[in-house]
Structures are given as C-alpha cells and as structure tokens.
C-alpha cells in the first residue's frame, strides 16, 4: 500500500515536471530568439522601426566614423569581432554580420531599435543613449553594412 502511493507520487511528479518542460519549450519569448532571421523588434513597434530611415548618407567618411565607434567607445568589437562574424558567447551568439541573407532581411530602423533597446534575453546591450549617441548609432549601422555588399 505504502509503495503504491510512492509510485503514484512519482508518476505525478514526472507529469508535473514534463508540463513545466513543455511550457519552457513553448514559451514564445524563448522561441523568438532562436531564429536569427526573425526580427528582434516587437510586433507593435515594427512598422515604426522600419519607417525610421538612416538620416545619414552611406559615404566613405560615414563608414569611417562608424568603424571608429565599432572598435572604440561602442565596444562592439569585443562581442562582434574584427571581421563581424562574432565571438562565441554562451546562450545567444552575436549576429554574423557577413551573413547576406540577414543583411537583406533587416532594415536600418530595425537595427537602430536593437541599438536603443538591446536584444532582450541575450547579451546584446543597449548602446544608443548609454555609451554612444544616436548619430554614432546610424554611423555604426553603415559600417555594419560594409561587412558585406548587399546587392
Ligand atoms: C556584450 C556583447 C555585445 C556587445 C558589446 C555588442 N553586441 Fe551586438 N549582439 C550581441 C549578441 C549576443 C547579439 C545577438 C542577439 C540576438 O540573437 O537577438 C547581438 C546582435 C546585434 C545585432 C543584430 C540585431 C538583429 O536585429 O539581428 C546588431 C545590429 C548588433 N548586435 C550591433 C551591435 C553594435 C553596433 C554594437 C556596438 C555599438 C554591439 N552590437 C555591441 C552581443 C553584443
């Protein structure tokens, strides 16, 4: 009798743990970040982010300024590496900036959203408004575009 209760308890504990595991796997906040091609901007802010255009022209001078931010006060290079492919980080690795498909899918406005808000749930920190200005942010976005020529 005592053993029977014990077996039944084990069954319910297993069921309970499986439910928790299923909830974690199904959590949209976690699933959201598993696909690198999916936008990091929440749906209710996406239209505004896409409509926000880079106010600065893509000139050699602008890219040079972006490069200085990337290697300097933005500290981008510590995670995104010199060649833009990124260092390995636990959890979510940094984006591979040489990935042409990712470059094509993302607008400058979506990248600016990430620079202002970080990528919640990952190591990508807020940069614009903390260590760099908005103009620096737009410049560094031009520099990120230069890792690959998007045709
Ligand atoms: C502490 C590490 C770290 C630093 C510093 C950092 N990043 Fe990131 N970055 C990440 C990680 C991790 C991701 C991947 C986040 C994800 O998967 O959503 C990322 C993603 C991004 C993305 C891709 C967002 C998207 O929509 O796909 C951009 C753009 C970016 N970082 C730009 C920058 C710039 C520019 C700087 C410097 C001003 C910078 N990052 C500094 C770790 C970092």
Image (spheres, helix red, strand yellow):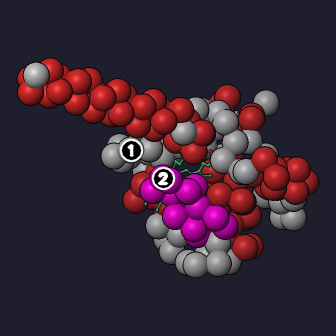
Disc marking residue 46: none
Residue 113 lies, in percent from the top left, at 71, 59
Q: Is mark 2 within 8 Å of ligand 1?
A: yes
Residue 97 quadrant: top right
Label 1 residue SS: loop
For the stretch drawn in magenta, the main secondary structure is loop
Mark 1 Cα-neighbour bin, 10 Å: few <14, some 14–19, many ≥20: few
Which quadrant does the C terminus fall into?
A: top right
Mark 1–mark 2 contact, CB under 8 Å? yes
**Horizontal placement of 48 versus 11: left or right?**
right
Residue 34 visible in this rendered orientation of the protein:
no
Decide which of tag 1 and tag 2 comes sooner along the chain. Answer: 1
Q: CA distance from mark 1 to mark 2?
A: 7 Å
Residue 104 pos. (x, y %)? 74, 34
Question: Which residue has dot 1 on it?
Answer: 91
Does residue 132 appear to the left or right of 134 in the view shown?
A: left
Whether the residue under disc 1 has CB within 8 Å of ligand 1:
yes
Q: Residue at x 74, y 35 (%)?
A: 105
Q: What residue lies at 67% left-to-right and 67% top-to-bottom?
A: 116
Residue 122 badge: 2
Q: Give the residue displayed 64% in from the left and 33% down from the top.
A: 37
Q: Quadrant of ligand 1?
A: bottom right
Q: Which sits in the foreground, 62 or 48?
A: 48
Q: Is residue 91 magenta?
A: no
Which residues are the magenta region?
115-127
Residue 22, compared with residue 69, is above or below; it is above
Compared with residue 123, is residue 100 higher up or lower down, i.e. above or below? above
Considering only vertical position in the picture, is 102 above or below 71?
Answer: above
């Amino acid at each position: 009798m005592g053993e029977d209760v014990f077996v039944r308890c084990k069954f319910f504990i297993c069921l309970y743990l499986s439910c928790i595991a299923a909830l974690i796997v199904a959590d949209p906040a976690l699933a959201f970040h598993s696909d690198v091609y999916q936008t990091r901007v929440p749906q209710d802010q996406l239209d505004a982010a896409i409509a926000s255009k880079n106010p600065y022209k893509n000139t050699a001078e602008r890219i040079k300024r972006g490069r200085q931010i990337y290697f300097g006060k933005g500290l981008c290079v510590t995670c995104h590496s010199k060649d833009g492919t990124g260092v390995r980080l636990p959890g979510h690795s940094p984006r591979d900036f040489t990935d042409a498909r990712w470059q094509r899918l993302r607008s400058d406005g979506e990248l600016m959203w990430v620079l202002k808000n970080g990528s919640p749930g990952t190591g990508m920190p807020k940069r614009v408004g903390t260590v760099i200005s908005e103009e620096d942010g737009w410049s560094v976005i031009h520099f990120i575009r230069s890792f690959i020529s998007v045709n």
